[in-house]
Every structure is written in structure tokens, then in C-alpha cells.
């Protein structure tokens, strides 16, 4: 905005110089030196053109186009004034009186171009500020409800809601409290609506989960009382429907919010996958055993699995040998035959 402000000051100076020029008298004669009013207008035009070049390096195309239109209007007014000086040399009238139509037309053109530039610069400044603000709010929202959270993954399976693990109950409540503590009002109307709809859906799910019961103090879950299936089957079915509907609404509203933030480029950039963990344990004979846990990452609804890759020759062998020719398979068959033979021999001795 500093370049826009500098250009605006130059435009105001040019407008003032043009006003003084319209009130000036023409040249005393055709061969007289350039009057002060003409020199001031020329200097103002040059300063404005310099400001335009600086603005083109920093401003957006909309602001630059409005600035170019303003420069054109000021330049046209300056040329009209110089033409009046040349054509009416020695006249005692003021330039604005010599051609009142040109005076009105050029004055209005400069004023309108100046107002258009101010409006364009203001809109651009507001939109840039709003985008930065919304981007920060989106980052806080993504931090409160992380896409790879275990509770979201559990809900996304859309299994029957007869039992709700404690980690899901605690995580839903924690996410809701985090979103409520951080009062977020997006400047973008669509983002603001999507955010409020998601928070409302999360609150509804939290309320529905609060209506379930823990069977005993050792249980790591809450549930819809199973005895309701006998004593009150209608209430049992309705409670399950309410829980499932609340869960589905949370997932739908979360997807809407993420899509809205993604369309505006507000989602955080995914980080590079981190190296897997390595854990060393001791076997029964005190020999060390190292277990590697590779990292697996999936995005955009994909699947990922982690595991140690098999060597190329083993992988080829595993894919090329049919199951019925596997040594393990026939070894198992042989073992079963041996056991069967022992059983038959035992029965024969018994007789």
C-alpha cells in the first residue's frame, strides 16, 4: 500500500496543478517563455508517471490499470491546457473561460479517474488483509481439528454407534472447546458460514454422545444401554439414529469447511513424511531385537500401509510360486498326515 499512497499523493499534486493551470491566463505571446502554470503541470505529470512505474512493480493488475487511466486523464488535461495557451496567446481570459466545455470534460475525467484509483486500491488492500487474516484463522482451525486425527478416522468408518470409545468422546469435546475458545469470524462469508455450521454440528454430536452411558467404572467406552432393545426398542433405535445422524453431519460439515478453505488456498502445506520409528527390545534369550515402524501417509481419501519391503528376489518368488506348490503348504500337509497316522495306530493298539 506504500506505493499506492505515494502515487495517490502525486495524483493529488497533479490535480492541484491542473486547477491552477485552468485559472491561469494564456501565454503573453507565441514566442514567450513557458509560463509558471504550464511548468508546474508538466512537472506534476512527470512525477505521476514516475509513480506509475513504481506502482507497476508492486501493485496488482487492477490497481495498476486504474493508475494508468488516471495518468492518461491527467496527461490529456495537460495537453488541452497547453493547446489553449498556444491558440490563445495574448488573450486576457482564463483558460477555463476560453473553452469551458474542455475545462468541464477534463476536470471531470481526472476526478473520476482519481476516485476509481482510490476505490481499486482500497478494495485490493482490504482483500489482501482479509486473505491474510482468513489464512491465519484457517491454520488455527486445522490445528484444532487435524485431518489425520484418530477420532475423525474412527467416525469416518461410519460404523453403528452402539458403543463410543472414550478417546472419541474426549477428542470431540476437546475439539469443540478449542473451537469455542478461539472465537473465529472469517471475513469470507462462505468460510464463516462453513465454520459455524461445523462447530454447531460438533456441538450436536457432543450432546448426543453425552446421552450414552458407561456400563461400569472399568469400561473404556460408553454405550446405548443394550437392555433398551428389550425394554424400549423404539428408544433404542431412535438413539442410534440420532447418534449416526449427528456423526454424519459432523463429517459432512468438516468436508465442506476443508473444501472451502482449500479453494482459497488457506490449508496448510502438507509436511514431508517423517522417518519411521525404531524400537529395540530384548528377546527371551536376552538377544536384542530391533523393530522398525515405517511411516505411511495417505491424502485425498487414499489408503496407506506401513511395512518393511521384501527384497526383490523374495518378492518375485512370492508372486511367481503358486500356493499349491509352496513348500510351506506341503510341509503342513505332511505334518497332518503324520498326526493322523499316530492316531490310527493308537486306536489299533487299543483294540
Image: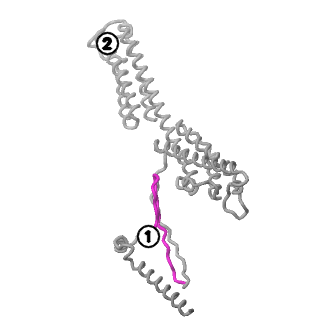
| Along the viewing direction, whichever of 346 and 210 lies nearer the viewer | 346
The local crowd at label 2, few if under 14, some if 14 to 19, many if 20 or more residues have their Cα within 10 Å, is many
The local crowd at label 1, few if under 14, some if 14 to 19, many if 20 or more residues have their Cα within 10 Å, is few
| Along the viewing direction, whichever of 295 and 107 lies nearer the viewer | 295
Q: How is the image coloured?
A: one colour
Q: Which residues are magenta?
A: 286-308
Farthest bottom residue in view = 349
Secondary element at tag 2: helix
Q: Is residue 290 left or right of residue 61?
A: right
- Measured as percent of width and height from the top left, residue 21 is found at 38, 16
Task: Confirm whether the magenta stretch covers residue 193.
Answer: no
| Along the viewing direction, whichever of 99 and 289 lies nearer the viewer | 289
In this view, 166 is above or below 133: below
In this view, 283 is above or below 80: below
Residue 314 in which image quadrant:
bottom left
Secondary element at tag 1: loop
In the picture, the disc for residue 308 is 1
- Measured as percent of width and height from the top left, residue 82 is found at 31, 16
Q: Quadrant of the C terminus?
A: bottom right
Q: Is residue 188 left or right of residue 161?
A: left
In this view, 210 is above or below 12: below
In the picture, the disc for residue 85 is 2
- Measured as percent of width and height from the top left, residue 158 is found at 56, 53
Farthest top residue in view = 92
Magenta stretch secondary structure, dominant: loop
Amino acid at each position: 500500500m506504500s506505493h499506492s499512497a505515494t502515487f495517490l499523493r502525486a495524483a493529488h499534486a497533479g490535480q492541484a496543478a491542473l486547477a491552477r493551470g485552468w485559472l491561469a491566463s494564456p501565454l503573453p505571446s507565441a514566442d514567450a517563455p513557458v509560463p509558471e502554470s504550464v511548468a508546474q503541470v508538466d512537472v506534476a505529470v512527470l512525477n505521476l508517471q514516475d509513480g506509475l512505474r513504481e506502482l507497476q512493480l508492486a501493485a496488482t493488475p487492477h490497481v495498476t490499470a486504474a493508475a494508468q487511466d488516471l495518468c492518461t486523464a491527467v496527461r490529456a488535461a495537460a495537453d488541452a491546457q497547453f493547446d489553449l495557451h498556444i491558440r490563445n496567446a495574448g488573450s486576457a481570459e482564463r483558460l477555463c473561460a476560453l473553452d469551458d466545455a474542455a475545462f468541464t470534460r477534463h476536470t471531470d475525467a481526472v476526478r473520476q479517474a482519481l476516485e476509481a484509483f482510490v476505490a481499486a486500491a482500497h478494495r485490493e488492500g482490504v482483500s489482501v488483509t482479509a486473505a491474510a487474516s482468513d489464512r491465519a484463522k484457517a491454520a488455527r482451525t486445522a490445528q484444532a481439528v487435524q485431518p489425520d486425527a484418530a477420532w475423525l478416522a474412527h467416525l469416518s468408518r461410519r460404523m453403528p454407534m452402539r458403543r463410543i470409545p472414550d478417546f472419541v468422546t474426549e477428542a470431540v469435546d476437546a475439539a469443540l472447546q478449542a473451537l469455542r475458545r478461539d472465537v473465529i469470524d472469517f471475513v469470507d462469508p462462505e468460510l464463516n458460514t462453513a465454520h459455524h455450521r461445523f462447530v454447531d454440528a460438533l456441538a450436536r454430536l457432543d450432546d448426543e454422545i453425552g446421552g450414552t452411558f458407561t456400563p461400569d467404572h472399568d469400561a473404556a467406552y460408553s454405550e446405548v444401554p443394550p437392555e433398551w432393545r428389550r425394554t424400549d426398542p423404539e428408544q433404542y433405535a431412535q438413539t442410534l439414529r440420532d447418534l449416526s445422524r449427528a456423526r454424519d453431519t459432523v463429517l459432512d460439515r468438516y468436508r465442506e469447511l476443508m473444501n472451502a478453505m482449500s479453494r482459497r488456498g488457506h490449508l496448510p502445506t502438507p509436511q514431508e513424511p517423517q522417518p519411521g520409528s525404531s524400537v529395540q527390545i530384548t528377546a527371551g534369550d536376552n538377544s536384542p531385537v530391533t523393530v522398525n515402524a515405517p511411516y505411511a501417509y495417505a491424502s485425498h481419501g487414499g489408503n496407506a500401509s506401513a511395512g518393511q519391503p521384501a527384497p526383490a528376489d523374495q518378492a518375485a518368488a512370492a508372486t511367481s510360486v503358486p500356493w499349491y506348490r509352496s513348500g510351506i503348504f506341503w510341509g503342513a500337509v505332511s505334518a497332518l498326515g503324520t498326526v493322523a497316522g499316530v492316531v490310527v495306530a493308537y486306536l489299533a493298539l487299543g483294540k
